[in-house]
Amino acid sequence: MAVLVIADHDNASLKDNTHKTVTAALAISGDVDVLVAGQGVAAVAAEAAKIAGVRKVLVAESADLGKQVAEAVTDTVVALSSGYDAVLIPATSAGKNYAPRIAAKLDVAPISEIIEVVDASTFVRPIYAGNALETVQSSDAKKIITVRATAFKAAGEGGSAAVETVGAAGAMAHTRFVSDEIVKSDRPELSAAKIVVSGGRALGSAEEFQRVIEPLADKLGAAVGASRAAVDAGYAPNDYQVGQTGKVVAPQLYVAIGISGAIQHLAGMKDSKVIVAINKDADAPIFQVADFGLVADYKVAVPELMDELAKVGL
Amino acid sequence: MKVLVPVKRVVDYNVKVRVKSDQTGVDLANVKMSMNPFCEIAVEEAVRLKEKGVATEVVVVSIGPVQAQETIRTALAMGADRGILIQTDEDLEPLAVAKLLAAVIGEEAPGIVVMGKQAIDGDNNAVGQMLAALLDWPQATFASKIEITGDKAEVTREVDGGLQTLSVDLPAVVTADLRLNEPRYASLPNIMKAKKKPIDVKAPGDYGVDTAPRLKVLKVVEPPKRQGGAKVESAAELVSKLKNEAGVL
């Protein structure tokens, strides 16, 4: 029984989601290979080969794979699938895009966003925005699974797997990449950051969001997040959204500023180790999950917090 | 061009669901049901395509119990032209749903399928991609903008890190994300008109596809409760606790 993990990367470097997905894969089988599908990914493959417990790294390269076009990834993975009993894919926007396509091509029921491996065919996954957890057992011979990476510890380094080139699918006939509009940032990536500072609707404008949330995040070396309400109102870009339909995060410290705490948002951050909430409404639901709640207007509390952090050397 | 929009009847997004004490599932008795919010966005987009003169007909398909007719009526009141209900009391898995939809598409031959990216009950985020795979059509998921020119659609997608734009040949499957549009409220005259629009009722057996479940739900439980609720009085106390008690600074 062998498992194929599809690496999460941006063609330049390997993302930590891959290490976490390898941990989930190792709970299923000791024979875990990693597929790096992209373009110009030699460095990524070398990083993947160092993950402890990985048997082999497969590299497939093409222009369409470099853009993670679903049809191209699907054709490449389907061609490799006969050697594997399960394919595990980090539940990123790219993974969620192609995983079900792979499953349908193989006539398999996909299993989305697992948070626990019970045994090789039984998994736990959240439903209803995380308000319930279902344990499902698959009767398919081959399993196609997306993994909620925050639920697993990252596999360590120290491996030295062989790297092997495999065939990539041909150019896609019906889908063409047009453009990317990727937000450039020196901050840590939201889903992998140790600290996240998020702003909500209370901020009132994009200017205020930048003025208040970003300096605090930079002081803490944190990633910036936002509630759906703040994103919908245009205060923050869409990829900042933390919540069931946005990103799921589980940092060491999550600081929620002016966020009321809709169920949808809580589903995306409630597994954080420590949650801080600053909100002037003492009845805001966010306080029910916060370890440290400060009932205060952010306009007063955030500058004070900046000063206090400076006092302890931050 | 015909637009086909699959829609699902789900627990209303405002309802706080409860897990049944026997761990067999979520308690749906006497709970408010509505159209899945992402499906509403898809219906809105299809109706706008018709209003712009890009689409000629909007066909809505739902797979579910007899009450899913109400969900179809909601879509008809928003401006869809006719509905198809594949009536079943079984909770079909995404693979089975995709196979049934593929069979419907074989009969209807739409120029594009616009549908929600996921249903807020099962949270699978799978049917659109699976449908595209079964039809061997291109897919453009998590759309925040759709522009159709001739036999191509340019779709802006919400991805990790920002946005990606793809051009896909039609027919294609496009799945709607939250920011594609803001669905309208149906007006009373349109609700009245919707009552006269046709709904064709079918059964899964009419399509001759395998809808047997592949997954067995062993149990459904509540997630562990987080112990929160503690308050601090000042920013100074907060920093002190984060540094000394929690050790996260």
Image (spheres, coloured by chain):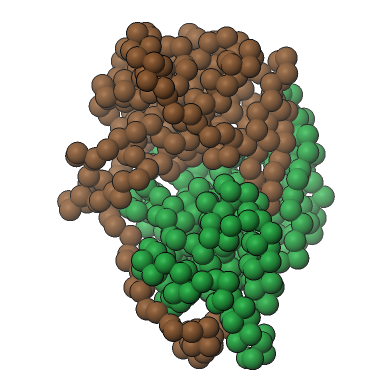
Q: Quadrant of residue A219?
A: bottom right
Q: Nearer the viewer, residue B132 or A262?
A: A262
Q: Nearer the viewer, residue B100 or B59?
A: B59
Left-right relation of A284 to A71? left
Number of numbered discs visible in the structure rendering: 0
Chain drawn in brown? B
- What residue appears at the point 46 percent right and 31 percent down from the top-left corner? B39
- Any part of residue A215 in sight: yes
Query: Taking A175 as reference, is A155 above or below it?
Result: below
Q: Is residue A150 visible?
A: no
Residue furthest left in the image: B22
Give above or below for A255 relative to B247. above
| Up/down of B42 relative to A4, above or below | above
Q: Quadrant of residue B177?
A: top right
Task: Report the quarter where the N terminus of chain B lies.
Answer: top right
Q: Residue at the far right: name it.
A: A40
Q: Position of residue B23 (x, y in %)?
A: 22, 51
Front one among B153 and A89 = B153
Residue A190 image point, x, y percent: 62, 61
Locate the C terminus of chain B and report the quarter of the image it occupies: bottom right
Q: Is residue B105 left or right of residue A68?
A: left
Q: Position of residue A290 (x, y in %)?
A: 42, 72
* Viewer-nearest residue: B108 or B76: B76
Q: Residue at x 31, y 15 (%)?
A: B203
Task: Residue at 38% x, 31% y: name it.
Answer: B35
- Residue beneath the point at 66% across and 18% down: B170
Residue A33 at x, y percent in the picture? 61, 54
Q: Which chain is green?
A: A
